[in-house]
Amino acid sequence: MRLTEKLSPKAQSIAEVFRCFVTFFLIAGLLLICATKMTDSRLTFAILLLTGWLSWTFTEYALHRFWMHNFFRYGKSNLYDIHMEHHKHPKDMKVNGYHRLLTFSVSVIILSVAIYLNNYFTLFAGFCLGFSFYSFLHYLLHQPWSRYIMPNLQKAHIHHHGKYPDKGFSFSVILWDWLFDTLPPKEAEISDKMLSFYFKNGSQSHQKKK
């Protein structure tokens, strides 16, 4: 029996938040140490950019899991209500093409500044690029054809909108879901009913793979 199983549900949630954040900071810290040890400035830039991007992917995971699904589950919150509305209507997204184009443009400008400065500002650039990538990726995950380019991510997201709302919290990568054991079960299947609800087009052609 895990030690946390003896705790109250609220204490278990807090312990899980602590575990996730400690794990992330250990990984990010290790990457930053590697960046400081590099003698090639291009490698340093790449590692800092990667660390910034990875920081966004964890932020995305943590916000989705602990803010939009966990702590507000038993209380009232506009953010919780908006997110639950998206669960009820998967195709209904508050972020449109204009917003995505704007975030991408700003990210390109920030990346250009980071290349010019070539210092720790690169971390921020990586974080912004991660957010920009996420804004496009979430839209793509709700398109039937995205199964050809990101099948595992889309399967996890379909399950998240379906039978497993307590699984599949990542959008950009499945790393954090895998690391913190929140991936949907491998044996879980995607039914035609789930596909019809998720895509809102009654498509029967989507793969129903495990």
Image (cartoon, rainbow, N blue to C red):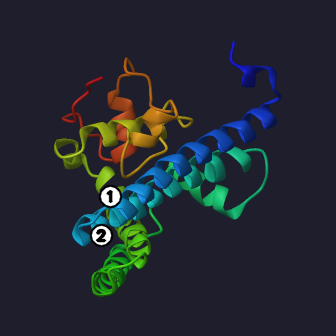
Q: Residue at x 27, y 52 (%)?
A: 143
In the picture of the structure, the residue carrying the numbered disc 1 is 137
The quadrant of the image that shows the C terminus is top left
Which residue type carries mark 2? Phe
Q: Earlier in the sequence, mark 1 or mark 2?
A: 2
Cα–Cα gap, marks 1 and 2: 24 Å
Corner quadrant of residue 188: top left
Local secondary structure at mark 2: helix
SS category of the residue bearing label 1? helix
**Callouts 1 and 2 close, C-beta under 8 Å:** no
Which is more toward the observer, 185 or 143? 185
Which quadrant holds residue 79? bottom right
Instruction: Name the residue rendered at 29%, 40% in the picture.
Output: 202
Look at the picture and state if 27 lies above or below 206: below
Whether residue 92 is visible: no
Q: How far across and how far down the image is residue 147, in percent?
A: 22, 42
Nearest to the observer: residue 14 or residue 65 = 14
- Above or below, 81 against 210 in this view is below
Left or right, 133 with reference to 148 = right
Specify whether 146 is left or right of 38: left
Q: Amino acid at mark 1?
A: Leu
Q: Is residue 93 above or below residue 200?
A: below
52 with respect to 112 (left or right) = right
Q: Circle 2 is placed at which residue position?
A: 45
Quarter holding residue 8: top right
Q: Position of residue 19 (x, y in %)?
A: 63, 39
In this view, the residue farthest toward the right is 8
